[in-house]
Every structure is written in structure tokens, then in C-alpha cells.
Image (tube, grey):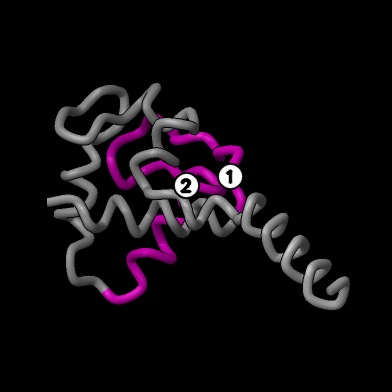
Amino acid sequence: MKKVLVPLLALGGAMLFQPAMAQDGEALFKSKPCAACHSVDAKLVGPALKEVAAKYAGQDGAADLLAGHIKNGHVGTWGQIPMPPNPVTEEEAKALAEWVLSLK
């Protein structure tokens, strides 16, 4: 019984602490400081996320590029106001980038 119960408990505990990549992109967006400068539909300080999705639609490597911009910050693509680095993991940055690119 112990041989079955211990692995099951370990698996259950591991599922409680899944990485943020398992979160849906919108929930992750709302949990990070992104919304201070971006909205889905309208330009605030930075471009609307739908504008970003349209600009990079169909481009190879777009998710990796955006993930890098999210994690490390960037300036120049949308004007001279810099986007600062964000407190996200690589997985969170990738999940956010993929979610942004999915917006229509």
C-alpha cells in the first residue's frame, strides 16, 4: 500500500505546483505588470496586444522574439518609449508571447 500511496501523493503535490506555463495566457497577463502599459484592444503606453499579434502574424520565430522582449525589455519597434524587463520566467514569457500571438 505504501508503495502506491507515496508516489500518488508526490504526483498530487507536484500537480499543485505546476509552472505558470500551464496557466492560460490571459490569467498570466493579468497577474503580471503587463496591463499597466498594454491592453488587448487599445493603445495605452505600449501598443494594443492585438496590434502586436497582427504585426507578427505568420512570422517564423515570432513567439521566441516576443518572449525575449517580454523578459528582457525592448525599445524601438513601437517608438522610443522603452518596455522594461518584466519579472517573468522563460516559460511565462513564452506562454505570454504565444497568447499574444493568438489574439485576433
Q: Among all residues in the image, which is located at the extreme right? A: 2
Q: CA distance from mark 2 to mark 1?
A: 8 Å
Task: Using residue 57 as the reference point, say whether residue 83 is left or right of it.
Answer: right
Residue visible at 78% across and 75% down in the picture = 4
> Which one is in front, 8 or 34?
8
Secondary element type, mark 2: helix
Q: Is residue 33 magenta?
A: no
Residue 62 part of the magenta segment: yes
**Residue at the location (58% across, 44% down)?**
88
Looking at the image, which is closer to me, 8 or 29? 8
Magenta highlight: main SS = loop
- Label 1 is placed on what type of residue? Val
Highlighted magenta segment, given as a residue range: 60-89
Q: Is residue 16 left or right of residue 31?
A: right
Residue sitting at x 37%, y 27%:
35
Q: Name the residue carrying label 1.
A: 88
Q: Position of residue 1 (x, y in %)?
A: 84, 74
Question: Disc 2, disc 1: CB below 8 Å?
Answer: yes
Of labels 2 and 1, earlier in sequence is 2
The quarter holding residue 15 reads bottom right
Q: Determine the secondary structure under disc 1.
A: loop
Q: Mark 2 sits on what residue?
A: 70
Q: Is residue 68 visible?
A: no
Report x, y in % for residue 10. 77, 63
**Which marked residue is nearer to the observer: mark 2 or mark 1?**
1
